[in-house]
Image (cartoon, rainbow, N blue to C red):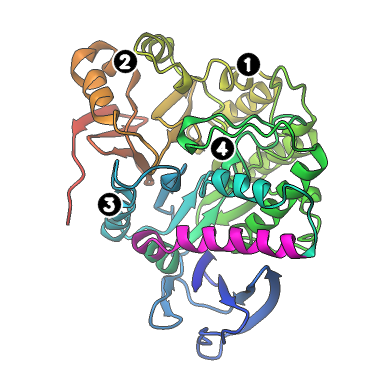
């Protein structure tokens, strides 16, 4: 199985995942240089191919199933953005879990997307985490460790093999960032073990009997899986065997855009458990500000990807969500702490200097909205495929019963993804599409997904 990672004007990164007994299917692209590094996780071998000396705006075919197109030089890229792909938490009988990737793929083909950002919670490992806890109830040894890795492999391969998602990962440049469900729900927020009582898991398992040492051991295994399945698409790493020491923030220059990927999880474990005072940490904060300044010096746009939104919702949103019994969607108890943090203040103060050359991109909250603060714009888009059955009813309420709130807030509570074009941005939901640009602000219309 071959996945396309980061692709630029003259180079590309490709990852191939094979069973231990499989031979590589990778076809060398003409005379271009390739380098290979192998990682082993459970019963899978991971090959990373770095392909260089390529020509801009040219399509390259790897084999019969995979290809990529290098970026145009000095261009503003067209980006597809999706986050919170938690379809494996839900009963497929309740809702078609693959429908939204089908529509995502259709849009990517229509607009000839340059690359795809998977903005965190790209896979939900919660149920697998609980399976591993049951597997290793007595102790973890070499046998259970290998079984644990194979269980994780099976889940990743099954999740990434959904046909339309697989097509996107084999035909476009893919950039993945981390959030908690890529490891386990609430990963990194505190040093405490979370209590799993979420109805969506259909397990209601409370794991208070699990020691912190065992919990951290499983987290490290999940983190290593994240590194080989997702992080390897965009970067090398030399610390796969001790992933707790790995920061996952990185930047790329893509055409006229500096893309800054932040890590909102690594530093959380060191914060007070009763209040989130920040998510970046001092070293990453200094790095983000330096990246923004450098991009501005080069007259480049800056896109900052953060799994946690920095710009809070309007009061209309929060009042409405509380009123209709959806308080878990509002960001008051979590994102609002970040919105009031010194980290946010420092970033937005610097972003304000660059005005329309800075864009924030986030997911996580299972809603889609555009946020504004001063001259700064933020796109929040999620989930791509995790909404339960009541989405239609809730969406009808927000669109027709409360039109004033709808006009003031411009938010989606249906499955959605984002398209980021040079001139304007779009949130494409199951029933509604919202366009936004600095000039025209909002334009909302009814636009149901179309089956093909």
Please state the horizontal and vertical placement of residue 392, each as a whole percent of the image: 24, 30
* Residue position for label 2: 408
Relative to 94, 371 lies left or right? right
Please state the horizontal and vertical placement of residue 352, each as a whole percent of the image: 57, 26
| Element class at badge 2 | helix
Q: Quadrant of the C terminus?
A: bottom left
- Residue 448 against residue 395 in the figure, above or below: below
* Residue position for label 3: 103
Please state the horizontal and vertical placement of residue 19, each as a whole percent of the image: 58, 77
Total residue callouts? 4
Question: Residue visible at 77% across and 21% down?
Answer: 272
- Alpha carbon of mark 4 to alpha carbon of mark 2: how far? 24 Å
Numbered range of the magenta stretch: 143-166
Relative to 368, 109 lies left or right? left
In front of the other: 13 or 267: 267
Question: Residue visible at 29% across and 34% down?
Answer: 435
Viewer-nearest of labels 4 and 2? 4
Viewer-nearest of labels 1 and 3? 3
Camera sees residue 12: no
- Alpha carbon of mark 3 to alpha carbon of mark 4: how far? 23 Å
Camera sees residue 182: yes
| Element class at badge 4 | loop
| Element class at badge 1 | loop
Q: Quadrant of residue 225?
A: bottom right
In front of the other: 354 or 83: 83
* Residue position for label 1: 340
Mark before the other along the chain sequence, 4 or 1:
4
Q: Quadrant of residue 281?
A: top right
* Residue position for label 4: 307
Please state the horizontal and vertical placement of residue 54, each as a whole percent of the image: 52, 78
In front of the other: 8 or 248: 248
């Amino acid at each position: 199985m071959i996945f396309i990672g980061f692709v630029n004007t003259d180079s590309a990164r490709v990852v191939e995942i094979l069973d231990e007994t499989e031979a590589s299917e990778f076809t060398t692209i003409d005379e271009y240089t390739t380098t290979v590094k192998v990682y082993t996780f459970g019963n899978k071998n991971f090959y990373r191919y770095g392909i260089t000396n390529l020509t801009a705006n040219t399509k390259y075919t790897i084999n019969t199933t995979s290809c990529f197109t290098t970026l145009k030089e000095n261009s503003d890229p067209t980006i597809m953005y999706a986050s919170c792909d938690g379809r494996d938490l839900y009963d497929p009988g309740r809702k078609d879990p693959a429908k939204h990737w089908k529509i995502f793929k259709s849009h990517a083909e229509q607009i000839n997307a340059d690359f795809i950002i998977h903005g965190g919670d790209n896979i939900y490992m919660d149920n697998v985490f609980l399976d591993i806890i049951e597997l290793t109830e007595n102790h973890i040894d070499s046998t259970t460790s290998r079984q644990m890795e194979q269980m994780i492999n099976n889940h990743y391969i099954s999740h990434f093999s959904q046909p339309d998602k697989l097509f996107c990962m084999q035909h476009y440049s893919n950039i993945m960032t981390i959030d908690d469900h890529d490891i386990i729900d609430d990963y990194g927020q505190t040093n405490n073990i979370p209590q799993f009582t979420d109805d969506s898991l259909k397990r209601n398992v409370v794991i208070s009997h699990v020691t912190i040492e065992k919990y951290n051991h499983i987290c490290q295994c999940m983190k290593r899986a994240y590194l080989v399945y997702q992080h390897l698409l965009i970067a090398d790493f030399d610390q796969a065997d001790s992933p707790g020491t790995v920061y996952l923030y990185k930047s790329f220059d893509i055409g006229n855009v500096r893309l800054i990927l932040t890590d909102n999880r690594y530093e959380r474990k060191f914060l007070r458990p009763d209040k989130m005072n920040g998510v970046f940490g001092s070293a990453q904060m200094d790095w983000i500000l330096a990246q923004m300044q450098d991009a501005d010096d080069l007259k480049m746009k800056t896109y900052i990807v953060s799994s946690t939104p920095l710009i809070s919702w309007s009061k209309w949103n929060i009042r409405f969500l509380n009123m209709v019994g959806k308080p878990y969607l509002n960001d008051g108890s979590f994102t609002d702490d970040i919105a009031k943090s010194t980290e946010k203040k420092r970033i937005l103060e610097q972003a304000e200097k660059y005005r329309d050359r800075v864009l924030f991109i986030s997911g996580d909250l299972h809603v889609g909205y555009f946020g504004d603060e001063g001259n700064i714009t933020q796109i929040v888009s999620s989930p791509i495929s995790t909404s339960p059955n009541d989405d239609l009813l809730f969406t009808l309420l927000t669109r027709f019963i409360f039109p004033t709130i709808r006009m003031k807030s411009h938010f989606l509570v249906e499955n959605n993804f984002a398209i980021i074009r040079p001139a304007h941005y779009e949130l494409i939901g199951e029933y509604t599409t919202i366009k936004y640009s600095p000039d025209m602000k909002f334009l909302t219309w009814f636009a149901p997904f179309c089956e093909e």
